[in-house]
Amino acid sequence: MIGRWLFRLVMFLYPARFRERFSTNMLAAFDAGRAECSTPREVRAFWARIVADFLKTVPRARWDALIDSHAPQDTPTKRERELMFDLMKDVQLAFRGLMRRPGPALIAIVALGLGIGLTASMFSIVNGVILKGLPIEEPQDLMAIQRVNPSEGPNRLTGRIHDYYDLRERQTTFETFAAAAIPSLNVSSTDATPEFVAGADVTANMFTMLRVPPMIGRAFVAEDEVLGAPAVAVIGHRIWEERFKADPGVLGQTIRINGVPTEIIGVMPEAFEFPFNQELWRPLRVNALELERGAGPGIFMIGRLADGVSTQQAQGDLSRIMTQLGVEYPDSNEGMSVAVGPYVREIIGFQIAGLLFTMLGAVSLVLLIACANVANLLLARASLRSKEVALKSALGASRGRVLAQMLIDSAVIAALGGVLGVGIAQVGIEAFNGALAGLPQGVPYWFAIRLDPTVLLFVLFLTLTASLLSGIIPAVRASRADVNAILKDDARGTSSLRMGRLSRGLVIVEVAFSCALLVAAGLMVKSVTKLSNVDYAFERESIFTALLSLPAADYPGDPERLQFFKELEERLQGEPGILSSSITTELPAVGFGNGRIEIEGREYQGDRDYPSARIGSVDPSYFETLSTNVIEGRVFESSDDDRSMPVAIVNAQFAHTYFEGESAVGRRVALHRVSQQGRENDETDTFYTIVGVAPDFYLDADAFVLAPEAIYFPLAQRPSSAINLMIRTQGDPLAITPRIREIVASIDADLPISQINTLGQIIRDGTSFFTIFGVMFTVFGAAALFLASVGLYGVLSFSVNQRTHELGVRVALGASPGGVVRLVLRQSVTQLGIGMAIGMGLSVLLGRGMSFVLFDVAAVDAGVLVGVFGLLSATGIVACLIPARRATNVDPMVAMRVE
Amino acid sequence: MDDLKSPIRITPAFFFLMLTLTEGASHGYAMAQEVEERSDGSVKLGPGSLYWSLGRLSDVGLIGEVDAPDGETDERRRYYSLTPFGRNILTREVSTLARVVEYAHLKRIV
């Protein structure tokens, strides 16, 4: 229904003659076409066609009309000429009216421009990140399928290869069901420096599912998935350009991936980096028969819905299969399920998606405040012009004509505001893109935030809505006015007061909305400030860090890796400028691994009853390098190696949770076998004896839990192929970079070093995401504060002007200046109070929507509420004092002469 | 007949629309549907394109508007038929195309 209405509205873009001739027929064709669509997808396709059709034919029809304009038959009808004339006259009048008092008009235009611009920037973000989807055919059918444990909440877990094969076999709702694993890949070839590349191991059907064929060469086929088949890879566009100088004969050449010579069989087109920002693809090869169920690489499932299948149906289908699997394989699958959701939303996470929509809601409050401002301005103008309007009515102008004239006022303001808004949106978009470009982890490849046709259409919609919202109340008021009363009224009587009540109501709305936004902004500012002042309890700024990944081909097992660590350690020792160095799998406050654990002597039922904890492998100098020490027991020693007794250090939180009141030292813990993916494991779990208790640190960058339970293992007992180097230096940590490169190259020239930075900077980068949102909320809050104070000032100064006569009489009768100020202020203080009370209530709702990005700040924070109360009262009272002061200066003689 | 010249360039969409009228009058939406079917979906006419095309064709006199047939009650339907001039132009243009296709076959393009 709304669609039909929209269609009729947009038809006005055609020239009048064309419309007159065909509008009913076009509407009939529209209805017939719309009636043929049954599924949502068909409706979308239909609308896409309608929009394309408009874009194509409006200019053509307009061109024809221009060419034919001299033709005699094209003269408009009399009625049309009249309408056109009226319209032009009204627009002219509106302009002239605005120019007569340019100050308020300018404020109104700036207000709407700000509201429209901020809303459009936020919409373009939501559009570019979520709504538009992947740049592939029918992106809305692409689903991410992620493993969940419903009893532990909505958190997404890594998928398991056996589940994938069973789901693929049994599902009936997907056209294609694919999987990918994200390995860590080193790429090297003889003539270029080794580099770390984001790549994916994908099932052979992945590219067909996406319907994106390679630009050169072929995609994977089923034979490529067979274990032992020749090593092949498809490379991304950037690698092709940079490493192969865009050589069209690249097929058949080899690159070394993790040390394995691999043949290039295809090159993907530019701007294809599926699943997130990958540039290198290998076939996923897993020997599922030999792996125990639940083991194997963590995978990630993606499916394309079959025609006419809804997300809910697919979810039902897969949930049913997961329940079956739970019965068949209770050990690994009991209680597990999968969540099916639109690809983009699942990948960026439902919290971020929710946050973006909350922000779009928040920023539309700014637009509403702006509309209230403009409505107030127009109300004021209307009451100034009430006599003129009444006279027109008395002389026979129809009510519709009066209404139209008032609406045109707001349309002119909104149109100018819309133009300004597009400019502001452009600035906002550029700023946001700039901030994203600064994110070290990069953003998914489909992010495209810009002023595209969708956004411009949205701006058009906002402009129309704004002009209606701000114009309709004044217009209806003016057209309904009692002509008799107004003409008899002597300009200071009741009519202006009646207008006053409405505009006071609008001010309350403005204050309420800006109060809510200011609280949101306050919460964000507090959160960002707290974040930058966190006491991390370990050294950060003087620590150099770098990432090394040892390729499996050159370092197939633990002995080779341990040998490398030992050599590296020896060469770093005695290096001038290095105070302490450490090799570890995890950096604190950057991100720790996760695994299920087992405490000796406790009973657990199924796999999922084993508690989870953060796990990491560190060498003996880990705590020393971070300038801390264990609080109980001892740190690891070089004698804690693969031949000695397995040992572990737990953090204080772990000791508190599992051994409350007793000493943790001497107790034994094990990693449950499900966590030991890809590691050789004998059936019995290895128990590690706790030898020390470490202080609590922040472990993750994004979860903001001060101290989740954590276990540290000796690197020598649990080595890994991906390790971080942490070096505490004297002086500038990054100054030793060239020396470190030399040292690593002297051990293995093929090994790339990546992510060179200071620990402090990496931690800040991990939280820069929160800073971006903090800045955005602050901008929204500032805009709201500005608009609300302008609104208060405008309404009050208008009402003082209207009451000049009355105030003059009061002063003449002996009222003191203080009394006059109090009189004027009393009214606005009431408005402020009511508005803030409503706004504080609203802010609770906003606070909930954003609680996910708040660091250590509750959604309702007394300090922020008091601060906003103070700021808003102060601004409000200043905005009122200026006109109130003017009231005291009213010269009684002048005031009396106003008549 | 050789001096007959089309007043406008006959685009594929125009061709299809005119061809739907060779067996008698029809109304706009029915024509659009037939065109989509006959062209295997390669020519899709939205409401704007459809009526813009019909407007052009009738402005230059290749087709003309006719009364709705008896029994048609929907006033929102507009019926068109080929004018004799339009039929001549269509025949001429199609025979030119036929020669092109014949030649293309000879050259083994298709």
Image (cartoon, coloured by chain):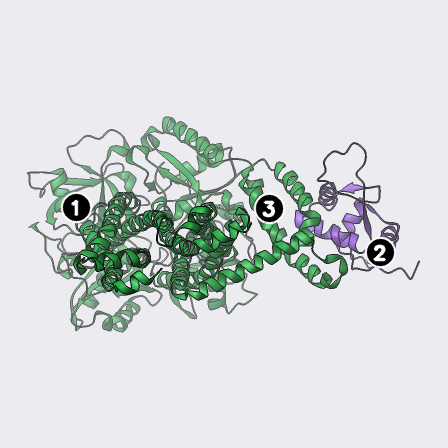
Chain colours: A green, B purple
Residue tagged 3:
A8
Residue at 27 percent across and 61 percent down: it is A883
Tell me the amino acid under the disc marked 2.
Answer: Glu
Q: List the residue tagged with mark 2.
A: B93
Mark 1 secondary-structure assignment:
loop
**Callout 1 environment at 10 Å: few (<14), some (14 to 19), or many (20+)?**
many
Q: Is residue A180 visible?
A: no
Where does the image place residue A841, in percent across and percent down from the top left?
26, 43
What chain does badge 1 belong to?
A
Q: CA distance from mark 3 to mark 1?
A: 76 Å
C-alpha separation, residue under disc 3 versus residue under disc 2: 37 Å
Name the foreground residue: A51 vs B59: B59
Residue under mark 3: which chain is it in?
A
Give the residue number, with chain letter if any, for mark 1: A646
Q: Earlier in the sequence, mark 3 or mark 1?
A: 3
Where is residue A734? Give x, y as percent: 24, 70
Count of numbered circles in the view: 3
Other residues around mark 3 within 10 Å, as few (<14) / some (14–19) / many (≥20): some
Q: Residue at x 11, y 41 (%)?
A: A656
Asked which secondary structure carries label 2, the reply is helix
Q: Which of these two is toward me, A152 or A401?
A: A401
When the figure is inspected, residue B104 is found, relative to residue A331, above or below; the finding is below
Quarter containing the C terminus of chain B: bottom right
Q: Quadrant of residue A280?
A: bottom left
Mark 2 and mark 1: span between their CA atoms? 90 Å
Amino acid on which disc 1 is placed? Pro
